[in-house]
Amino acid sequence: MAKPLAHRIAALINKGLSNQEIIARLKCEPQSVYNTRYYLKNKTKLLDKQKTKRKYVRKAVEPVVVQAPPTPADLPTEIVESPEVRTPLVPQTYEPSLWERIKYWLAVK
């Protein structure tokens, strides 16, 4: 039993023949060659998509705990005066914000 025309066209396409050469060899309609080539191109696209398909797993979202910055009342209140500068020293665990530094700078002058 002979192979169907589409299989013979596909075999010649796989060998690298052009559409005109296939039409001349098999004496078939050009539309059947174009249709077979179109089918093979879409079939390979679908296979490529199936190979590269990825599963997306949604990660569990951890709740974000927002902690307020320590207020000056929560910090140690030890104030040590430096004899050369005469400004209160702040413990190193607390760095004043930009707004607090501006207020202090404006208050001193």
Image (spheres, rainbow, N blue to C red):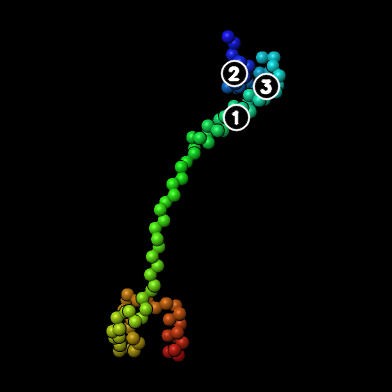
Q: What residue type is labelled 3?
A: Ser
Residue under the image location 66 percent in, 25 percent down: 35
* Residues under numbered marks 1 and 2 in contact, where contact means CB atoms less than 8 Å apart: no
Residue under the image location 40 percent in, 67 percent down: 66
Q: Name the residue under label 1.
A: 41
Residue under the image location 32 percent in, 79 percent down: 75
Q: Distance between the residues labelled 3 and 1?
A: 14 Å
Instruction: Give the quadrant of the N terminus.
Output: top right
Query: Residue 47, image x and y in percent?
Result: 53, 32
Q: Which of marks 1 and 2 is nearer the N terminus?
A: 2
Closest to the observer, 49 or 61: 61
**Is residue 12 visible in this depiction of the protein?**
no
Please tell me whether mark 3 sits on a helix, a strand or a loop. Answer: helix
Query: Residue 90, image x and y in percent?
Result: 33, 81
Q: Which of marks 3 and 1 is nearer the N terminus?
A: 3
Q: Residues within 10 Å of mark 2 (few under 14, many from 20)?
A: few
Checking the image for residue 32, the label placed there is: 3
